[in-house]
Image (cartoon, coloured by chain):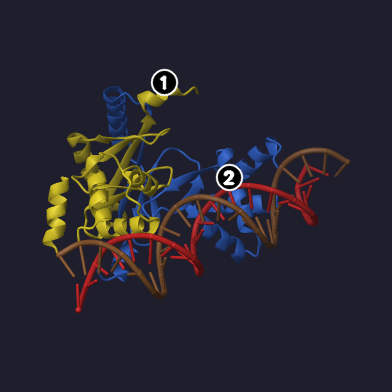
Chain colours: A yellow, B blue, C red, D brown
Amino acid sequence: MKYEDIIMRLAGNKHRLTRVRKCMVEFFSSVQSPISVEEILQHLGEISISANKTTVYRELEFLLSQNIIEEVCFHDMKKRYEIAKKHHHHLVCKRCYRVEEVECNNFERELSVVSRRLSQKNHFAYVDHSVEFYGVCDICSQNTIV
Amino acid sequence: MKYEDIIMRLAGNKHRLTRVRKCMVEFFSSVQSPISVEEILQHLGEISISANKTTVYRELEFLLSQNIIEEVCFHDMKKRYEIAKKHHHHLVCKRCYRVEEVECNNFERELSVVSRRLSQKNHFAYVDHSVEFYGVCDICSQNTIV
DNA sequence: CTTTATGCAAAGAATTTGCATAAAG
DNA sequence: CTTTATGCAAATTCTTTGCATAAAG
């Protein structure tokens, strides 16, 4: 979703368009990857918005509650957030945690089949999935020995 | 891997077989699911082994370094550990975090295909994957309204 | 004006570190 | 004996809470 659309949606629902809120929404819509609290704080610092950690945490909570962002979880166990969008998967660099998006229809179909099978066989309801691919990106391959 | 095999392996590598170490290995090999630090401490308490938190954290680190256990990550962002074993996936209850193992050869083959494709297309090396299925287990379906 | 957001300090939870002591072999 | 593991207290890191003040509309 684009910045303007999110802002309009928030305004439409009578939510306030504060400085920190706008900056965070703007940041989320400008980056493609999931970002951490750390990165948000750093970014706000860079554009000279002094926002308190607490405010950032509270804003994340707000944006989650509005389904504007989603939480994602990679193997380093750091919480990251990204703009809520069409279901997709991530290809994550194990070294630098740079992220690229993965889309694959055939594969998605296969996942549905497996989910349905599990649902029946193991008696689980509402089965969905979480898939990430991990590798070493080209930059890290060049920069790192090992 | 079975308790005895792990113990033999550790002894073979001249690692000490302390009380806490044996109890933790025994616990890991007795449960099928990934367990949290909390659950380990609770279990040790139940069998009247007074072990300090710190010791548990250090022992986990040790067992990880020996590739006896592996860390797994679910959506609640709590660290869990399980005996290192043949590659597999998890079917996790979104409510109670009970875990069942998933095995599916066809699906695994499909995952390899996708990994290989991503590796080429996105220029990532050593691409592997992490897949979890999330649903609501039968017990939680019965116990909970919503 | 009224409501909601913000900052700050302090509280909590999870994890790690330093150091002296205990236990393994 | 020598080395490794343990416990305890304190330090760190990440996150949340309470409360008074500021900003949005």
**Residue where numbered disc 1 is placed:** A142
How far is the residue under mark 1 from the one under mark 2?
Answer: 30 Å
Q: Chain of mark 1?
A: A
Residue A66: x and y, percent?
A: 21, 59
**Residue where numbered disc 2 is placed:** B61
Q: Is residue A123 visible?
A: no
- Amino acid type of disc 2? Glu
* A98 and B140: which is toward the camera: A98
Horizontal side of residue C2 vs B58, given as left or right:
left
Residue A62: x and y, percent?
A: 27, 60
Q: Residue at x 19, y 40 (%)?
A: A109
Q: Residue at x 40, y 41 (%)?
A: B88
Residue A90: x and y, percent?
A: 29, 38
Horizontal side of residue D4 vs A14, given as left or right:
right
Q: Which numbered disc, 1 or 2, marks the residue closer to the eye?
A: 1
Residue B30: x and y, percent?
A: 54, 53
* A46 and B129: which is toward the camera: A46
On the image, which quarter does residue B115 sit in?
Answer: top left
Looking at the rendered structure, the secondary structure element under dot 1 is helix
- Amino acid type of disc 1? Gln
